[in-house]
Amino acid sequence: MFIASGLLLLQFISYASGVPPLVRIGAIFSNQPGKYNSEMAFRYAIHKLNMDKSILPDTTVDYYIEYVNRFDSFETVQKGIINLHQLSRSFNGEVHMRQVSRGSYLYALKEFKGKEIHNIIIDTNSNDISILLKNILQQQMNEYKYHYLFTSFDLETYDLEDFKYNFVNITSFRLVDTGDVGVKQILKDIAFYSHHMFKNPFFNLHVKKSTILESEPALMFDSVYVFAIGLQTLEQSHSLTFSNISCDEEIPWNGGLSLINYLNAVEWKGLTGPIQFKDGHRVQFKLDLIKLKQHSIVKVGEWTPQGHLNITEPSMFFDAGSMNVTLVVITILETPYVMMHYGKNFTGNERFYGFCVDILETISREVGFDYILDLVPDRKYGAKDPETGNWNGMVAQLMKYKADLAVGSMTITYARESVIDFTKPFMNLGISILFKVPTSKPTRLFSFMNPLAIEIWLYVLIAYFLVSISIYIVGKLSPIEWKCIHPCDLDNISIGNQFSLTDSFWFTIETLLQQSTDIHPRAMSTRIISSTWGFFSLIIVASYTANLAAFLTTERMINPIENAEDLASQTEISYGTLDSGSTMTFFRDSLIETYKKIWRSMDNKKPSAFTTTYEDGIRRVNEGKYAFLMESTMLDYIVQRDCNLTQIGGLLDTKGYGIATPKGSPWRDKISLAILELQERGEIQMLYDKWWKNTDETCTRKNTSKQSKANSLGLENIGGVFVVLITGIILAAIVAFFEFWFNFRYNYKATPTQSVFDDKSTQDEILESERTCSQPDRCFWIEIYEELRYASWCMNKQKRPALRRTCSECTIPKSQRINKL
């Protein structure tokens, strides 16, 4: 790029004072072909200045032109290499700089294409630009993903016909507003002047073909007028003295410094816009940002030294309405977002189905593009290696421009957003904990004892024995508890105490069971113990009754963890997350102490703590003793289809899924608008319901909160009460039998025979009795049988059967039996 193609030299004809009648201006131009417009603009500016007597009315301006070889030091000074070094230092990213010539254009383009470099700044000679454009077409680097910025201000003069319909991004800056009426008029005047005043065919041919005023001729025209205006101002303010100056003597003109100061003070509107200087630099000017569109080059923004770049037409950078392009879209298999048909009948995009595939298909119709969907090679979403700084997964593919879009359950994070772009989120979510449903306590036969802990039951039992023994002892010590047994029998006075050892235990248990008793304490001491025991029994029974309903009707779960804090503070249950995913990055970069503790534990157990797929993590959770940290939307999908799994706690963070694009991709904004429109129409929610809440795939989960209100108690809940009842009945029967047994044995030995008390017994009865009782054991069991028959008789008999021991041994009077012995 040439900053200027001419050098102005000033020569005054000797004159006493004021501006001399003839001022000669010398100019140096390159003899390079195609550089005639600057010379023509210089000639025309002098001509127009002489015709316009409003600036220098008494002075005629003449010119003198010299041509130099384009390979000498004059042109060498104009190379832009220093400016490019300054440009590279202004970028934070990686910059590749190549100094090229006509023969090395193709080599540099091949290198850039191989390195996936798509943003290219071109600063080269305008005469060679046609060769560069042909090489770009040859390398097929005219796709929409490439962005070329030309440093030349004359982009409109280039032949870009082959680039108009390939959606390639070509931008540049323009110094001269070609739509300005004054510029158009000057261009016509130059063409007329060159045609009538000069016979040079190169001048005429080039001017006739040109409908655009280039920047260098415009600057040349403005520089002549700025000089004239400065000279006029100098004349009006100072008395000028001119003299001939020899090139052989180093004697400067005394008025040169003053002229420079007045040139800096010039304010004028020229072909290149408002002209104003400060400290020798031009200020208050404007550059138009222009961009190649399908049919023409249009203005899309402005740049000024004060406000810098202002894009006024952002929509011009991307127009998908009439596009017919095919984008490369990468994805990763993840149920239900992206799944694959593995049959032979499925090819291309038909292989994939799922929630994200449906969204992609809908967006492609809305925005207007075709796509080729394929899997990312390493099957990873993308994470940055903290040691090497390199990215992997879909992020790396987008950074290398090997794909146009990345679709899937890809989380928008700060780290990813710094290297790639994301659309608006199409789904909001957070991190949560997937865990196996805790097993409920097995229903035991004696579950009615659950309301009180085992140690409480033991304490109650110990208290029962202590209180019973205390009542017995206090009752014996207190004289008030003693009373006469037969108060009417004054000859045989006998006293007794109602608190025997057995009665004391009976009184205590009846009080505990809230039953009435026939034992009533009379002494103050026994009443104090009884009252204290009654209050104790009231609290115990009330607490037991209140807690019994909850324990028998509510299904209790053994839940070892309730939240992330519980997970971090234990070691029995291992946990992990998906490798190279956003969840892993969240814990790795978190500053919260609980999450840092979780990360240290996972990092120390690497690689066993991490899984390559969600399916692997879900399998490990089902095996038990493992918690999987994953994103809530995926977790929700899993727990609705596997009732053995559940979510623990709430969300640990909030984020969203978005469609990823390379940095600066023109597709991001259009896809974002499409996502917003789909959300407002409810289509994304309908797709969510389709893939998440399909009743054919979801399982029926027990709702314990509702069951606790409606469920009736089964035998497994209170069956132990019946066992206690049956055991009590059996125990009572056994005790009753032994009571009967011991009582019968006692009465059998102590009760005299019937003949002892009945003198009417005859000898025949005695003989019969001896005959029947010849076997004493048989006689004993006969008596037992008679007693049992009486006890089990349904109707009460008025007379109890008497014992019939009538053997010869029994009939002998007691005194005779003793003598006989």
Image (spheres, helix red, strand yellow):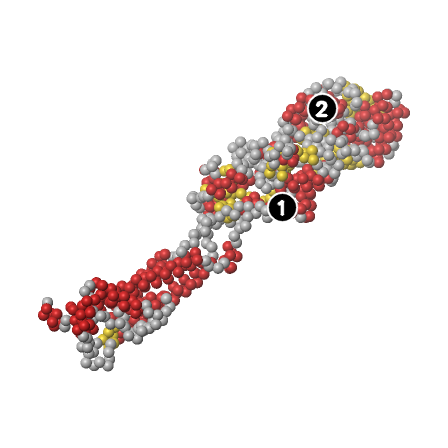
x 80%, y 28%: residue: 217
Which secondary structure lies at badge 1? Answer: helix
Quick one: label 2, few (<14), some, or many (20+) residues within 10 Å?
A: few
Q: Is residue 767 something that shows in the picture?
A: yes
Q: Where, by quadrant of the figure, is residue 120 drawn?
A: top right
The answer to whether the residue labelled 2 contacts the one labelled 1, judged by CB atoms less than 8 Å apart, is no
x 20%, y 73%: residue: 754
Q: Where, by quadrant of the figure, is residue 100 drawn?
A: top right
Identity, as a three-letter code, of the amino acid under mark 2? Gln
Instruction: Identify the mark nearer the N-term, 2 or 1.
Output: 2
162, above or below 636, in the image? above
The spot of residue 689 in percent (x, y) is 62, 47
- In the depicted view, which residue is nearer to us: 378 or 298? 378
369, above or below 465, in the image? above
Residue sitting at the far left? 819
User: For mark 2, what is the residue?
Assistant: 138
Of the residues tagged 2 and 1, which is closer to the observer? 1
User: For mark 1, what is the residue?
Assistant: 690
The spot of residue 774 in percent (x, y) is 18, 65
The spot of residue 372 in percent (x, y) is 66, 33
